[in-house]
Image (tube, grey):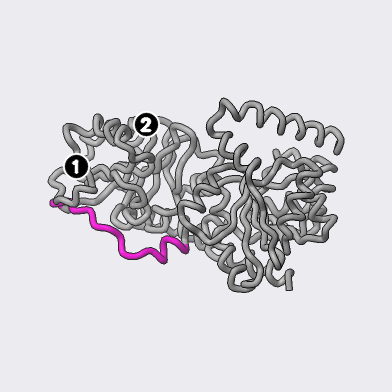
Amino acid sequence: MCILYNAFINVVTFLFYLISWVKPKWQARAKGLLSQKINHCSSSRIWFHCASAGEFEQIADLLPFFQKKFPEHPILVSFYSASGIEWIRRKQLPYETVYLPFDRKRRMKHFINAVQPKCLVIAKNEFWPNMLRETKKQNIPVFMVSAKVTSNFIGLRSTCTKKILQGVTTIYTQDVASEDLLSKVHPSVKTTGDTRISRIYGTQHNRQKSIDIPFTIKRPIIIYGSLHKEDHGVLSSLDQLRQYNHVIVPHEVHPQSIRYFSTFLGPNPPLLSSNSPIDSNVVIVDTIGKLATLYEHSIFAYVGGGFSKGIHNIIEPLIHRNIVCIGPNHQSFEEAKTLSNLGAIEVINSPKEFVNSLKKVLTLGRNDLEKKHNIATAFIQSHRYASEKVAEDIMRQLR
């Protein structure tokens, strides 16, 4: 199996460099791998690894714990894709960032020797066989954070997976079901919750006061957050909802996107950036970074992406006690599946269903609405301290 795997990785590496010349998204990784140099460090590093910027959300709140506990050990974050490195540099976060090389045996050994890790913390299920074999050989503690698997995970039926995971010290799972499954192939598995939800909760509660939406006529507000072009159908029913104010937040806020959504909202819809009183009952948010705070004003939120690549963040509006509605493409998002099954959020299979879904919810009695809010709140609270639990347990084992 090892021979076949190593041969496969060598082929993948060769093809990647070959194709990267015509794939702009791959060029950043290719150039980064060829040019990056890891400087010698006088003390060992705390090494975090995640696939991309999205997975970084799973570990971001752990980093300050380690900075405080081990100030003498620099933090290094490795990524597989360019998005994570670009995100950290754009935010000017004080962490060393590198590309994780392809999982070739010699190359991985050279990389780990250069990093000199005190430990390795991996986001979700982003583990590589040669990486774990080498860390095990060098007695480097390895921790997997926010792991999530289902009974369909092929690795659960593989003796190879069990052998590879011997290189992991502890696996922290998002839920009990994952713990039960992974316990069959690893002796140390603990349920601590979803660290991404923990991060969102902390970020929302530490935000400054939200910005104002200067509607001249005060009505209940509906937010349409992170809209993709494929979500535009939900805007076709605004004429039936004149008793509400509507805040449209495109996923992308470049001029072409703003013009696209404007075509569904009548002539010259107002933009929030104008800072002028809004006489209409519709406004387009045309600047980034505003959505999370705007949910403080709304009672109902349609979260976009469910009719294209997948939904966006539903935790932010739920924290602010919005009733949330999403499209059908949400099966890759465990919180959405769970909350949908519990009846805490609304799911529509067609944009035409949006108005009926909204009207159904808003005609619910106070007790039924409160039940939805309570289910969502209990779910979020169950993950609230996930990052703290993981950090404390890892640091206990590193003493």
**Quadrant where the image shows the N terminus:** top right
Q: Main secondary structure of the magenta part?
A: loop
In the shown orientation, is residue 261 left or right of residue 156?
Answer: left
The residue carrying mark 2 is 229
According to the picture, the residue beneath numbered tag 1 turns out to be 270
Residue interval drawn in magenta: 202-217
Q: Residue at x 39, y 47 (%)?
A: 324
* Of pointers 2 and 1, the one earlier in the residue sequence: 2
Classed neighbour count for the residue bearing mark 1: other residues with Cα under 10 Å, few (<14), some (14–19), many (≥20): many
Identify the image quadrant of residue 156: top right
Q: Is residue 232 visible?
A: yes
Q: Tell me where residue 386 appears, x and y as whole percent.
A: 58, 62
Instruction: Tell me which corner region of the image, top left, top right, bottom left or bottom right, holds residue 382.
Output: bottom right
- Residue 182 versus residue 115: which sits nearer the camera? 115
Q: Nearest the camera: 287 or 366?
A: 287
Q: Estimate how packed mark 2 is, as few (under 14), some (14 to 19) or many (20 or more) residues with alpha carbons within 10 Å.
A: some
Above or below residue 282? Residue 319 is below
Q: Residue at x 54, y 39 (%)?
A: 331
What percent of the width, then of the height, locates residue 314? Answer: 44, 49
User: Does the image show residue 175?
Assistant: no
User: Residue, x 55% and y 48% (percent of image)?
Assistant: 85
